Image (cartoon, grey):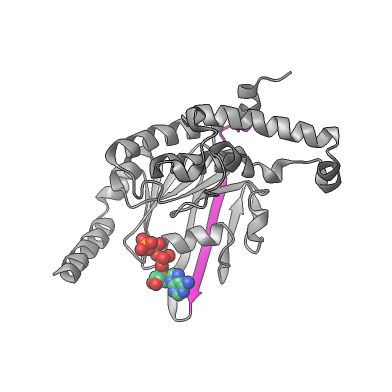
Amino acid sequence: MVSHATDVETTKRPLTDKPLLRVESVTKRFGGVVALSDVSFDVLPGQICGLIGPNGSGKTTLFNCISGIYRPESGGIYVDGTQVVGTKRHRMAALGIGRTFQNLALFRSMTVRQNVLVGAHHLGHSGFVANALRLPSAGRDDARATADADVLLEMLDLAPVADVLVAALPFGTQKRVELARALIGRPKLLLLDEPAGGLNHGEVEELERLFLAIRDRFSLAILLVEHHMTLVMRVSDKVVALEFGVKIAEGRPAEVQAEPEVIRAYLGDTVERAHEAA
Ligand SMILES: Nc1ncnc2c1ncn2[C@@H]1O[C@H](COP(=O)(O)OP(=O)(O)OP(=O)(O)O)[C@@H](O)[C@H]1O
């Protein structure tokens, strides 16, 4: 029998130069507003890509285009070579796209373990009838999901609260539950929407350690939308910067941070906020 740890590790992919995520000339408009204009970039397996930009620069719109919430007017989005534009949202997990949400989307009256297991739903291969009749193949799916859940609960330091109702847990712990729920679906691409929002300094440091461990263990491509600049610059292998829907920089964190366009975009944003606050 395969050990639990080995079982989850089978999701590890060999590192190649073939992009896991390819965003190709994506344009998205809302009426007269061009939220994304001809945006292109790649993310390789095993890479964390930070997506940055001032408020309203198009980060969430791009995220929503990748995860099937919005359909871009033009351009292509490929996950492991498969075009995902136009795919229904509920099919995204089966295509290998996992995500977490800015404002958590957990079942609050369920335990941590139950919430995590929800993320394995699409992996069952035994089908509706086998599940309804509780045939042995359905039992095997359950056993595999339970084993994977145990590994992830341990890895994300959730084992001690596995049987606690989510509603009773601090926000930072709930964020780790969302991460475990996304990971149990064995995503190739993990989309993280402002994971550090609402966390304290220690929790952000813990998150940094976790992201690196997750990337290394599963060789995922991770796209990280985050305002916490220190976190982005420390964990990202590459950074893409947007302003008014246009890509203004792409490269290693230090390169992007030093880019005059990026400095100008952020300073402008800070000055505007200072004016608003005055
Ligand atoms: N559903 C929508 N309807 C109309 N306009 C929208 C919609 N969603 C976004 N926009 C507009 O598109 C542009 C990009 O917004 P988006 O939310 O993607 O930016 P963002 O970089 O995620 O901002 P923030 O950092 O504040 O979350 C903005 O001008 C915004 O007002």
> Vertically, is 103 above or below 203?
below
**Residue 111 falls in which quadrant of the image?**
top right
* Residue 47 visible in image: yes
Range of the magenta residues? 10-30
Residue 222, horizontal then vertical, whole percent: 49, 44
Say which residue appears at 40% left-offset and 51% top-offset: 194
Residue 92, horizontal then vertical, whole percent: 64, 53
Is 238 left, or right, of 93 in this rendering?
left
Say which residue appears at 58% left-offset and 36% top-offset: 113
Residue 146, horizontal then vertical, whole percent: 66, 31
Residue 232, horizontal then vertical, whole percent: 35, 44
Is 172 left, or right, of 217 in this rendering?
left
Ligand 1's quadrant: bottom left
Q: Which of 246/210 is in front?
A: 210
Is 46 left, or right, of 240 in this rendering?
right
> Vertically, is 206 above or below 61?
above
Q: Quadrant of the N terminus?
A: top right
Say which residue appears at 44% left-offset and 81% top-offset: 32
Report the label total.
0
Q: Quadrant of the C terminus?
A: bottom left
Q: Most extreme residue toward the left, as rendered?
A: 278
Magenta stretch: residue 185 in it? no
Q: Which of 10/83 is in front?
A: 10
Q: Which of 263/214 is in front?
A: 214
Say which residue appears at 82% left-offset and 48% top-offset: 128
* Residue 187 visible in image: no
